[in-house]
Image (tube, rainbow, N blue to C red):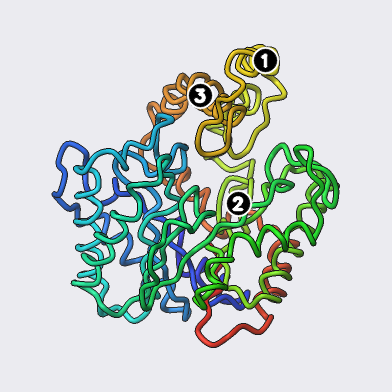
Amino acid sequence: MFFADEDAALLASLGLNCVRLPINYRHFEDDMAPFEMKEEGFELLDRAIERAARHCLYSVIDLHAVPGGQNQHWHSDNPTHWAAFWAHKHFQDRVVNLWEVLARRYRHQPWVAGYNLVNEPGDARGNAIWPFYQRLYEAVRAVDPEHILFLDGNRYATEFGLFEQVWPNVVYTCHDYAVPGFPDGGDYPGVSRGQHFDRDALERQFIERTRFMSETGTPIWVGEFGPVYTGDPVRDEMRYRLLADQLDIYSEHQAGWSLWTYKDIGLQGLVCADPASPYLRRIRPVLDAKARLGVDAWGSTDAGVRHIMSPIEETFRKEFPDFQPFPWGQDSWIALVVRHILLAEPLVGAFGRCFEGVRGEEIEALADSFCLAACLRRDRLLELVREASAAPLPPDQPTTGS
């Protein structure tokens, strides 16, 4: 069981008071049956909220993936490099409807801290997000006038110029990933992607990303952040130092935070599946291929495919020097299209074939790979979170573990 009472108890033992629960619209409706809600999805969410509440943890419901994809990347469940959500009213209508249903279901649930309406929006033109936020805000408030609404800035929760007014009982949420914590990050303190990063540089980035909140007097909540761990003790120690500096900055500026993520297969989680577990053993060939081809956007580099990437990058720099596509420019866009789509797509079928013929008890053993008792704990990371959660914050300012 991925999130059981034992998991909630562990987060509470770290001194945390809230958990951000990412959900995918597919839990609640099918693309071939839009607007027809699936009760089993809500029951899963109910159980997670109830388990958290039993250990005095509030929940923030985070709509992490919407129909059509709200940004250009895999984590919005987008198989393309276009965020179609912003160009199709049908997709937007479905999200408004889903949030009306969610708000109606949880409007009287005291252990729900609020609703994170759209995770990391990526409206390339920037002209659709504010009208949609206005519409969504009004729709949710008509159903639930009480719960906090968490609104991410554009460009993956880093830009806030879109907000034309400040609404009551709304938290404007930034995400604060740091370059040295990415898979291709360099030394910390030190140089990553041609820039020097140390605590002062991290603080300057944080101040810039939260300027809107400071100027409007609204709460500061870092909805996501956290480095990727490599398995190399020296490099990981630098990443723990990076994380410690970020947590120290948030404490100094009285910012709430939500670390990404609580549990995974070994990249960032406070706890992670054991490499010797049935699940990871079964998918190991695909994981090896992902690493070899650099297709995992969040957990690999392009070291093994430079012979493919270099000539494409050089051609683009020569032929299209002014081409700087949203959100992160030319090289990032090429990596997305070539590595994370073109080379990744064949592995979807390979991943599915890993589970052919699985039946009965074997299914249970695969699922049990994610039970807390079977997982590995990152003691150093747990200790950093425990120390940071003990730092004083203003009343009712949320800190979270996932």
Mark nearer the N terminus (1 vs 2): 2
Q: Which residue is mark 3?
A: 337
How far is mark 3 from mark 1, CA to CA? Answer: 16 Å
Residue in front for this viewpoint, 361 or 332: 332
Question: Residue 195's x, y, as percent?
Answer: 78, 43
Residue in front for this viewpoint, 152 or 374: 152
How far is mark 3 from mark 2, CA to CA? Answer: 29 Å
Few, some or many C-alpha atoms within 10 Å of disc 3 (few <14, some 14-19, many ≥20)? some
Identify whether 59 is placed above or below 32: below
Q: What residue appears at the point 36 percent right and 35 percent down from the top-left corner?
A: 359
Amino acid identity at mark 3:
Val
Closer to viewer: mark 3 or mark 1: 1
Say what secondary structure mark 1 lies in.
Answer: helix
Closer to viewer: mark 1 or mark 2: 1
Q: Which residue is mark 2?
A: 272
Amino acid identity at mark 1:
Glu
Mark nearer the N terminus (3 vs 1): 1
Q: What residue appears at the point 24 percent right and 75 percent down from the top-left corner?
A: 144
Say what secondary structure mark 2 lies in.
Answer: strand
Question: Residue 98's x, y, as percent?
Answer: 23, 56
Q: Which residue is mark 1?
A: 314
Q: Please give left or right for residue 324 compared with residue 144 in the image.
A: right
Few, some or many C-alpha atoms within 10 Å of disc 1 (few <14, some 14-19, many ≥20)? few
Label at residue 38: none
